[in-house]
Image: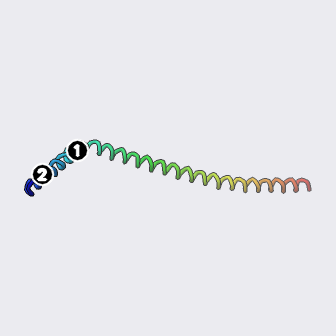
Amino acid sequence: MTFDRWMELITLALAIVAGVYAALMVIMKPFTNQLQDIAQSMKNSSQRIERLFDSQNALREDLITSRSEHKVINERLDNVEDDVRELKSK
């Protein structure tokens, strides 16, 4: 085969590949749009889940702080009750 024949075959192959690629792009466009919508929805869901976990962690920390504060308050009340008993006994 001559060089010109090889060039024609390569050009024809490239044209066929480009045509198939263009056809696939047209056919697959709705599916790619749906996939992008699904990906965006998943991203939004994961962000909501992250915010939920963050708020739960913050709530947990608040509860731990509150628990320690209640413990201190209860100790103070016990001390006050002990002082009141002591004063009553005098």
Q: Nearer the viewer, residue 88 or 31?
A: 31
Q: Dot 1: within a 10 Å radius of its alpha carbon, few (fewer than 14), some, or many (20 or more) residues?
A: few
Circle 1 sits on which residue?
A: 24
Residue ID at (72%, 54%): 71
Name the residue tied to disc 2: 9
Residue appearing at x 56%, y 49% in the figure: 56
Single out the residue that lies furthest toward the right. 90
- How far across and down, in percent of the image, does residue 17 sit? 19, 49
Q: Give coordinates of residue 55: x percent, y percent.
A: 53, 51
Quadrant for the C terminus in the image:
bottom right
State the residue at coordinates (61%, 53%): 62
Residue displayed at 33% across by 47% down: 36
Q: Secondary structure at mark 2?
A: helix
Q: Is residue 24 left or right of residue 79?
A: left
Question: Which of these two is toward me, 34 or 2?
Answer: 2
Comparing 75 with 22, the one in front is 22
- What is the count of numbered marks? 2
Q: Name the amino acid, label 1.
A: Leu
- CA gap, disc 1 and disc 2: 22 Å
Report the amino acid beneath label 2: Leu
Classed neighbour count for the residue bearing mark 2: other residues with Cα under 10 Å, few (<14), some (14–19), many (≥20): few
- Rendered location of residue 7, percent (x, y): 11, 55
